[in-house]
Every structure is written in structure tokens, then in C-alpha cells.
Image (tube, rainbow, N blue to C red):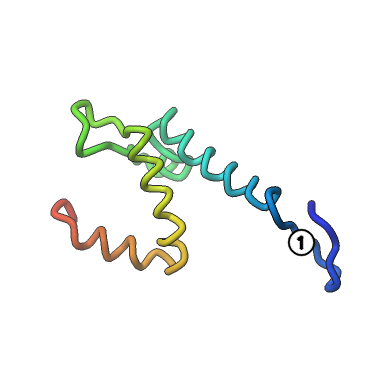
Amino acid sequence: MGEPNSDGEYSIGGWPAIIPIIFEFTWIVGLKQLFDATIGNLIAGLKLISLNSVNSELIFGQSIKRHLMDIIDMAFFGVIGIIVILNTKKSA
């Protein structure tokens, strides 16, 4: 996929470069809405819950907001996420 560059590798740019990002985002958020978990969570026996909703189900908007922050969290190798988790009231 992409076009060969001067290094003999393939590069992709412009709108086609966004397709994998959209696919991954849709895949993760969609799985969470359908199964209340991602594949890794299902394997580990974890279920996502909301602390804000009445029936504790994860709301679509919450999932979107959480994964928009993944970009920042991944840029710092998860350190920001760990700091936030450790500083919450519900942290064990």
C-alpha cells in the first residue's frame, strides 16, 4: 500500500494515511460498545463500566473521549495515563 520512495520503502500521505487511524478508532470504540470490552479485556475477563451512568454501562461519548486522549497518552508511552490513574479517588 502506498507509493515507493527514494529509499525503496513505501510511503503513504494525505487522506489515505487517515484510513488506518479511522479503522483502529472505529474498531476499538465499536468493540467496547458491542461487548463492553476490547479483545484484550475479554481475554483477561475485564468489563468496562461507567461510574457516571445509572446502569454502569459505558456510554458511547465516554468511549470516544477516552480514545481521543489515547493519542496524547501513547505519545508519552502511557506515563500520563498511569499518573492520572494513580491520582484518582478510586485508585486501589
Up the image or down, 64 lies above or below 4; here it is above
Give percent across and percent down for residue 37. Answer: 40, 37
In the image as oriented, which residue stretches furthest toward the front? 14
Give percent across and percent down for residue 89. Answer: 13, 54
Q: Nearer the viewer, residue 33 or 19?
A: 19
Is any atom of residue 92 visible in this view? no
Tell me where residue 45 sits by quadrant.
top left
Helix, strand, or loop for circle 1?
strand
Q: Residue at x 44, y 41 (%)?
A: 43
Give percent across and percent down for residue 56. Answer: 23, 31
Q: Quadrant of the C terminus?
A: bottom left
Q: Is residue 18 left or right of residue 13?
A: left
Q: Is residue 27 left or right of residue 16?
A: left
Is any atom of residue 31 visible in this view? yes
Q: Residues within 10 Å of mark 1 (few under 14, many from 20)?
A: few
In the image as oriented, which residue stretches furthest toward the left? 89
In the image as oriented, which residue stretches furthest toward the bottom? 7
Q: Residue at x 46, y 38 (%)?
A: 29
Tell me where residue 61 sits by quadrant.
top left
Give percent across and percent down for residue 38. Answer: 45, 40
Which residue is label 1 attached to? 11
Up the image or down, 2 lies above or below 37; here it is below
Q: Is residue 18 left or right of residue 43?
A: right
Amino acid type at image mark 1: Ser
